[in-house]
């Protein structure tokens, strides 16, 4: 069935297969990149930023603790200034906490956040705000009592909740990192499998395509080389119906046509050879006859020359006879009746002589034409 598929269709198929494989690999890569980007974004927005916010909150809380501890022995003006700074840190902590709560929180993280809010609420209301009020009032004794009493009891739960939140951020960040690594490894394996599959399929399809084309081209080349050598007796069969298969069939038809043409040319050559032999024989016969005619003409010419010589002699004799007739006529005129008879006789002789002259002229013409023919 595949032998009936055209080379064009095969090439389109293999190109389409390679394109689909490349698109698949690209999609897997893009999906992996998207997941990695989402994981990095989540790690940054929900873990690193949150971890920074928690770190700032913890740092501000520690600064407040240090500020309150130092303010126990400070003067009233310093107490009021430090109280303002503590109040600003409290507002900053509230803003940071609001921003932190706007990030993505896991269930465990929400639970720890609720515990932190409760612990910090107790710490702020039970110790921090009374301490700020004492600082603004310049009451060092009340401040010392708060710092050494309720604050020392309420602050450790805040630090513990904050530490758990920070540790949770690290734990969740590590989990997301491991998940990202797992997704990367999976995408990497899928991409490698697709690449290997594409290479193997490409090699197999390429081998199948090149082998089929090579076989068909070898058949066509065999016919062409045989025709070039003058061998028209080759038998090449092909069951392919693609472009090259049709080319082989066309070459076979051309070979058959050449065989038919050569046969016709050979038959015509045999006919021409026979006719040429007959013409040569006729030419030889004509040459012999021509030689015979030439010999006969030569003999005729010789005879005509002899006849011409005889005629010339007769003409001389006739002239002499004519002269004698003239003389005889003169004698006849003198001789009377005898002479009259002689005159009549000579007249007859004279007429005969004229006829002989005419005959001689005719013979001269025949001899001239005979010489021309010779």
Image: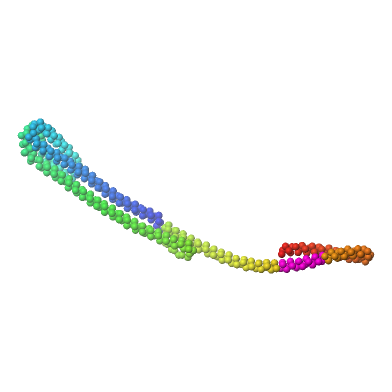
Up/down of 339 relative to 10, above or below? below
Predominant SS along the magenta part: helix
- Please state which of residues 80 and 54 is positioned toward the viewer in this rendering: 80
Say which quarter of the image contains residue 362. Answer: bottom right
**Residue at the farthest right position:** 336
Figure colour scheme = rainbow
Q: Is residue 148 left or right of residue 343?
A: left
Q: x%, y% of residue 202?
A: 34, 56
Query: Who's the residue at 17% across and 45% down the image?
Result: 169
Say which quarter of the image contains residue 92. Answer: top left
Query: Who's the residue at 50% across and 63% down the image?
Result: 259
Q: x%, y% of residue 101?
A: 18, 41
Say which quarter of the image contains residue 51. Answer: top left
Q: Is residue 258 visible?
A: yes
Quadrant position of the C terminus in the picture: bottom right
Up/down of 33 relative to 342, above or below? above
Query: Who's the residue at 64% across and 68% down the image?
Result: 284
Was residue 300 drawn as part of the magenta stretch in this picture? yes
Q: x%, y% of residue 23?
A: 32, 50
Was residue 42 drawn as part of the magenta stretch in this picture? no
- Please state which of residues 273 and 7 is positioned toward the viewer in this rendering: 273
| Total count of labels | 0
In the image, the segment drawn in magenta is 296-315
Quadrant position of the N terminus in the picture: bottom left
Q: Is residue 3 visible?
A: no
Q: x%, y% of residue 246?
A: 44, 58
């Amino acid at each position: 069935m595949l032998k009936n598929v055209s080379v064009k269709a095969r090439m389109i198929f293999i190109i389409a297969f390679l394109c689909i494989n490349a698109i698949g690999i690209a999609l897997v890569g893009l999906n992996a990149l998207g997941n990695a980007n989402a994981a990095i974004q989540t790690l940054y927005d929900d873990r690193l930023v949150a971890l920074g916010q928690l770190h700032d909150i913890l740092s501000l809380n520690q600064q407040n603790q240090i500020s309150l501890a130092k303010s126990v022995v400070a003067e009233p003006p310093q107490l009021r200034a430090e109280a303002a700074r503590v109040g600003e840190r409290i507002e900053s902590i509230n803003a940071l906490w609001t921003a932190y709560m706007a990030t993505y929180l896991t269930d465990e993280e929400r639970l720890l956040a609720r515990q932190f809010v409760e612990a910090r609420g107790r710490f702020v209301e039970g110790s921090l705000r009374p301490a700020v009020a004492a600082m603004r009032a310049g009451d060092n004794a009340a401040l010392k009592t708060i710092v050494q009493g309720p604050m020392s009891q309420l602050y450790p739960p805040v630090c513990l909740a904050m530490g758990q939140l920070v540790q949770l951020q690290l734990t969740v960040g590590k989990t997301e990192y491991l998940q990202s690594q797992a997704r990367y490894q999976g995408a990497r394996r899928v991409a490698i499998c697709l690449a290997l599959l594409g290479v193997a399929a490409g090699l197999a399809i390429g081998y199948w395509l090149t082998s089929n084309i090579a076989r068909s081209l070898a058949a066509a080349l065999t016919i062409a080389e045989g025709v070039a050598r003058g061998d028209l007796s080759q038998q090449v069969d092909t069951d392919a119906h693609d472009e090259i298969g049709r080319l082989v069939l066309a070459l076979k038809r051309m070979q058959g046509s050449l065989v038919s043409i050569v046969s016709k040319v050979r038959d015509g050559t045999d006919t021409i050879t026979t006719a040429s032999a007959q013409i040569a024989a006729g030419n030889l016969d004509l040459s012999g006859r021509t030689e015979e005619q030439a010999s006969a003409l030569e003999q005729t010419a010789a005879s005509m020359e002899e006849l011409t010589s005889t005629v010339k002699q007769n003409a001389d004799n006739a002239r002499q006879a004519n002269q004698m007739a003239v003389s005889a006529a003169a004698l006849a005129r003198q001789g009377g009746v005898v002479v009259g008879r002689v005159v009549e006789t000579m007249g007859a002789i004279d007429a005969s002589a004229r006829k002989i002259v005419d005959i001689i002229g005719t013979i001269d013409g025949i001899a001239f034409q005979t010489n021309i023919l010779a």
